[in-house]
Amino acid sequence: MIDLSKYDKKVNRKELEEQMKKASENSFDPVPAGDYEVKLEKLELKENSKNNLMISAQYRILNGPEKNKCLFQNITISGTKNDGFMLHQAKELINNLGFDIEFESYVQFGEEVEEIADSAIGELYDIRLSYNGEYQRFNFI
C-alpha cells in the first residue's frame, strides 16, 4: 500500500476543506439545449490527452439562468479516422467566428489560429446549443 501520510503532511487541511466546500456549491450540470449569447474567452490549438492536435474554444454565457457557465467546443484535427473532415469542421468554427482560414500545413494553421484568437477573444456571439446523444452541437445564429 502507498504511504498516504506524506500527503497528509503536505496539505493545508483548512484550505482543502474550503476548496471542497466551494466545489460542492458549484453546479457542473450540463447546460440545457437552447440559444445563448456568449463571449469567446479562449481559442487555441493544443494537444489532447492522446497527443492529437485539437482546436479548442471556450465561451462564457452572458445572461439567463445559465449565466456565467462555460461552454467548451473541441475539435480534434489530427489522428482521427477522417482528419480532412475534422479540419473542415475547424475551418467552419473559424468562419462562424467571422474569420477566413485556409489549411496549408499544421504550422501555418496554428499561426493563423493564434492571430485570429487575438482578434476574436472578447467578441460576442449567439449560439444554438443542441445535443446529439451525449455530444454537444454548436450552431451560430
Image: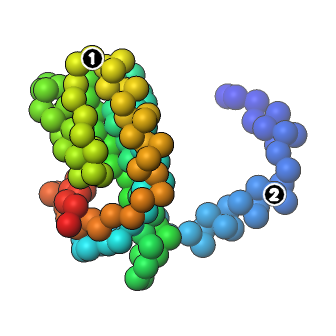
> Residue at position x 43%, y 79% from top?
63
Query: Observer-nearest residue: 32 or 122?
Result: 122
Q: Residue furthest bottom?
A: 64
Image coordinates for residue 39, horizontal then vertical, percent: 43, 62
Q: What element does badge 1 sit on? A: loop
Residue 13, located in which quarter of the rendered image? Answer: bottom right
In this rendering, the count of numbered labels is: 2
Image coordinates for residue 53, horizontal then vertical, percent: 34, 26
Query: Observer-nearest residue: 108 or 66?
Result: 108
> Residue at position x 26%, y 29% from top?
77
Inter-mark Cα distance, 1 to 2: 47 Å
Query: Observer-nearest residue: 69 or 107?
Result: 107
Residue 32, located in which quarter of the rendered image? Answer: bottom left
Q: Is residue 107 left or right of residue 77?
A: right
Which corner quadrant holds the C terminus? bottom left
Q: Amino acid at mark 1?
A: Ser
Image coordinates for residue 4, horizontal then vertical, percent: 75, 36
Determine whether 47 is above or below 32 in the image.
above
> Residue at position x 67%, y 67% from top?
22
Q: Can you identify the residue that label 1 sits on?
A: 105
Q: Is residue 44 left or right of residue 8?
A: left
Which corner quadrant holds the N terminus? top right
Query: What is the basis of the colouring in this image?
Result: rainbow
Q: Amino acid at mark 2?
A: Glu
Q: Can you identify the residue that label 2 sits on?
A: 15
Contact check, label 1 and label 2, Cβ < 8 Å: no
Look at the image and tell me whether residue 93 can be seen.
Answer: no
Kindly report which numbered mark, 1 or 2, lies closer to the viewer in this rendering.
Answer: 1
Image coordinates for residue 87, horizontal then vertical, percent: 20, 31
Look at the image and tell me whether residue 68 can be seen.
Answer: yes
Other residues around mark 1 within 10 Å, as few (<14) / some (14–19) / many (≥20): few
